[in-house]
Image (spheres, rainbow, N blue to C red):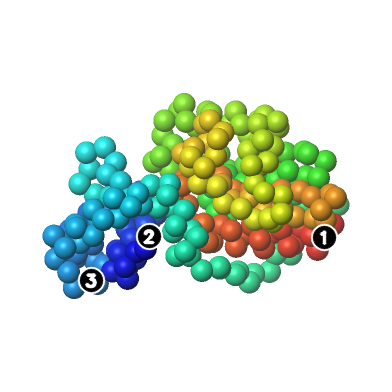
Amino acid sequence: MLSDRQKFIFNAVLREFIDTAEPVSSGWLSEHSNLDLSSATIRNELKGLEKEGFLMHPHTSSGCAPTDQGYRIFVDDFLPELILDFEDSDFFIEAKNIDELLSQAVSEIAKLTKNIAIGISPTKKIYYTGIANLLKQPEFKDAKKSSQIVEILEDLPQLLNLFSQVPSDTKSQVTIGGESSQEGIQKCGIIRTLFGPKELQGILAIIGPKRMRYDYNQAILNQFARALESRI
């Protein structure tokens, strides 16, 4: 169980790392986190968070970065549900069927989240876009990592297997890093949302770096899932 001080420090580390992709040092926290604590005191708290498995030191860096376990507790316990309220009718222009609706939805989700957006229709047709968004992130400058993700996107059985790991009794789900058994995707975060009636369900999903904005991206998916359900 984290103390209030540890929660504050952990939250500060996560939010800074999400924004910058750079490890966060005790010195930075002492200067910017509004904690009236010395760098040495903060360093001790960071060591405690490392011991719990929530933070790590990447390479030989003096700063900390979140582990998969750290991201998980952050998503589950630190992020309140975000509800967006925007007019979605402008995103669907003269769509005549579910495939056109889904294609337009995927395009807009990629633009809004700056990640890869995926849609799978009830007839198992795949739409995806936003690979360029992922390639701009420092985590994916390695061509091999990027190509593995593209291979999964272009392989329907692999993609369905990726999403089949989500319990069928939940409409939304977040998978972080090594929580997925799918090779090539373990450097990513995945958010998946279902839409449509149970007998004819489609999938909307986002794939991005583990440090993506889960609350905002989940809210975007939920908004578009509701919009699709109202139109099919």
- The kind of residue on which mark 2 rests is Arg
Label 2 sits on a secondary structure element that is helix
Q: Residue drawn 52% across and 42% down?
A: 179
- The kind of residue on which mark 3 rests is Leu
Badge number at residue 15: 2
Depth check, mark 1 against mark 3: the one in front is: 3
Depth check, mark 1 against mark 2: the one in front is: 2
Give the mark nearest the N terminus, 1 or 3. Answer: 3
Q: Where on the picture, by quarter, is residue 2?
A: bottom left
Q: Residue drawn 37% across and 63% down?
A: 1
In the rendered image, the vertical position of residue 200 relative to residue 74, given as above or below: above
Which residue is more in the foreground, 217 or 168? 168
- Tell me if 100 is positioned left or right of 134 in this view: right
- Tell me if 70 is positioned left or right of 213 in this view: left
Q: Pick out the residue farthest to the top.
A: 144
Give the mark nearest the N terminus, 1 or 2. Answer: 2
Q: Residue drawn 81% across and 45% down?
A: 122
Residue 20 visible in the picture: no
Q: Which residue is denoted by mark 1 in the rendering?
A: 231
Label 3 sits on a secondary structure element that is loop
Local crowd at mark 3 within 10 Å, few (<14), some, or many (≥20)? some
